[in-house]
Image: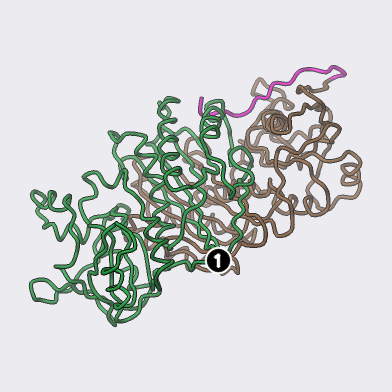
Chain colours: A brown, B green
């Protein structure tokens, strides 16, 4: 994986090799052409994500937090399949002016997140670039007896649920957020979850992804949507209401999922983890609506967009 | 894998979804949080690589060739393990001024290379960037009864071999090169290969990687090193000899491997594929030397470096 390895890159490889925890999943780790993984217990899931300075974080963000975010974004995608991430790869384009210490901060952030979730740092690549810092992470998980949860299984009558609260992530949460790995695996283990994804584009846009893949519609209940404190703070000056922020802000990285409404009520009454869960609506035949102040209004799937 | 999906990104996802060939390996492909792969026949190998405009290709390179290269670089790493790539993921940072047509050219190049080697395009991510075009590819392969070949197995007395010819890749080969997938798998199937890698940093630097991982030394035979026509052309005006180019130029993407010397002679006498193979030296206890005009000279592991 390390084409065009240089002295600086070797030092970085050593730096992370010393810190990467041993893992029963990794048979050959950092330092060969490929990592060799033993992930043979059922299907594997793979996700790749790219975060770029000026788009997903700004130049003032602590580099250790940027490293954390790069890992967490991919872990959130594996969690969105109801599975646990097991191995992480990271390719980094480092600005030419970067020092070794700066590069190490990023690696430490990646390693923080890997340690927190028991994921093996299994390989990567670095290159220098005239451009902004960009980090490409690839995370792998394995079914291990569980069913990977896709976006396509929502059924008419399903309850729609989200973890925690939504909106205003840009005020800080988007950087060192906690991917809902434990919650997703617990849900997948304890319940028949019909469809699941993580909210990265914003609630309405991402719900629309589930509806398109499941060929269904939905009605959201405005009063039931858990609005974050950050969304309320932003609503004070943004010209948008806190509800609008909760519906359309990107990078919440909360779980959005659908399940049988009776099972959903059981989950609310007898929580299986501490993170709050809310029932925010129901799956219908077609269309996307929100019930707000007694009225049923069409809801446009609007989210964060950066490549037009 | 698609955080912050936008209209442009959706159009690109559709574009590549229509072209991506169906694969028995891919259970859930492009369009969910993760791809779901069925790669359970033995260990899997994973590699991630990043290519950036201005470092790995210049702005004048045809974008379809850049797409090919991004895929081929990762396929070459899987080949270097003696295995066949089976699934590819690509994350792209596209300059803000990029048109849909330019992005499509890259995807077509990726798809060309996937089609050529029977690899499934299984997912990816795109984002816009103020910086140069960068493409991060992740390729996966599966052992399927074969042994993954690492850099660490070279034994004293082994013959050292390379495929085809070396040096001067920058004159053109580095872009639309053919990764040695078929050759690597054929070698792994027919012989006990002790160590293998692909030459990306240059022959002497990469041989040194094998020596470090195998705790061994080597003597190269200058007369036996297959010098490419491009290395000869470059030698005419670069101030370096064609041999120096063959020893130190990066991005040859040929296979470098070691095996029992008797088996190596059998391979030369009874080739198992058309690509030429040369015996270029032998593994020793320690040190790295080259025999040139009757003299045994110490050889410095010099290769292409870009991050200092």
Toward the front, the furthest residue is: B270
The x, y position of residue B94, in whole percent, is: 43, 34
Label 1 marks which chain's residue?
A
Q: Quadrant of the N terminus of chain B?
A: top right
Say which of B157 and A117 sits in front. Answer: B157
Regarding mark 1 in the picture, which secondary structure is present there? Answer: strand
At horizontal 79% and vertical 54% (from top left) the residue drawn is A189
**B306 vs A238: above or below:** below
What residue sits right under mark 1 in the picture? A26
At horizontal 40% and vertical 44% (from top left) the residue drawn is B70
The secondary structure making up most of the magenta span is loop
Magenta residues, start to end: A293-308
Magenta stretch holds residue B91: no
At horizontal 51% and vertical 52% (from top left) the residue drawn is B86
The x, y position of residue B304, in whole percent, is: 26, 55
The x, y position of residue B118, in whole percent, is: 47, 47
At horizontal 39% and vertical 71% (from top left) the residue drawn is B191
Left or right: residue A298 compared with residue B118: right
Magenta stretch holds residue A307: yes
Badge 1 density bin: few <14, some 14–19, many ≥20, Cα 10 Å: many
Say which of B142 and B170 sits in front. Answer: B142
Say which of B101 and A91 sits in front. Answer: B101
The x, y position of residue B164, in whole percent, is: 26, 58
Count the marks: how many?
1
Left or right: residue B62 compared with residue A218: left
Say which of B85 and A146 sits in front. Answer: B85
Left or right: residue A96 compared with residue B40: left
Q: Quadrant of the C terminus of chain B?
A: bottom left
């Amino acid at each position: 994986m390390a084409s065009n390895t240089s002295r600086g890159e070797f030092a970085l490889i050593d730096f992370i090799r010393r810190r990467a925890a041993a893992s029963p999943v990794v048979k050959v780790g950092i330092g060969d052409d490929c990592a060799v993984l033993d992930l043979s217990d059922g299907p594997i899931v793979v996700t790749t994500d790219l975060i770029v300075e000026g788009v997903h974080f700004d130049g003032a963000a602590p580099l250790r937090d940027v490293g954390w975010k790069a890992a967490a974004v991919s872990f959130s995608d594996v969690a969105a399949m109801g599975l646990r991430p097991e191995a992480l790869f990271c390719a980094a384009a480092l600005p030419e002016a970067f020092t070794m210490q700066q590069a190490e901060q990023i690696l430490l952030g990646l390693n923080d997140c890997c340690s927190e979730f028991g994921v093996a740092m299994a390989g990567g690549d670095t290159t220098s670039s005239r451009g902004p810092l960009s980090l490409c992470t690839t995370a792998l998980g394995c079914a291990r007896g569980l069913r990977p949860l896709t976006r396509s299984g929502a059924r008419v009558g399903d309850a729609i649920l989200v973890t925690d609260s939504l909106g205003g992530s840009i005020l800080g949460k988007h950087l060192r957020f906690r991917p809902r790995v434990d919650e997703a695996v617990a849900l997948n283990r304890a319940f028949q979850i019909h469809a699941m994804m993580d909210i990265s584009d914003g609630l309405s846009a991402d719900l629309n992804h589930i509806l398109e893949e499941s060929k269904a519609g939905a009605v959201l209940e405005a009063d039931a949507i858990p609005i974050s404190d950050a969304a309320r703070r932003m609503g004070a000056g943004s010209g948008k209401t806190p509800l609008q922020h909760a519906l359309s802000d990107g990078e919440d990285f909360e779980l959005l999922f659908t399940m049988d409404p009776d099972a959903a009520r059981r989950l609310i009454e007898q929580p299986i983890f501490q993170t709050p869960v809310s029932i925010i609506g129901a799956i219908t035949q077609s269309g996307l609506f929100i019930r707000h102040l007694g009225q049923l209004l069409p809801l446009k799937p609007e989210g964060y967009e950066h490549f037009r």
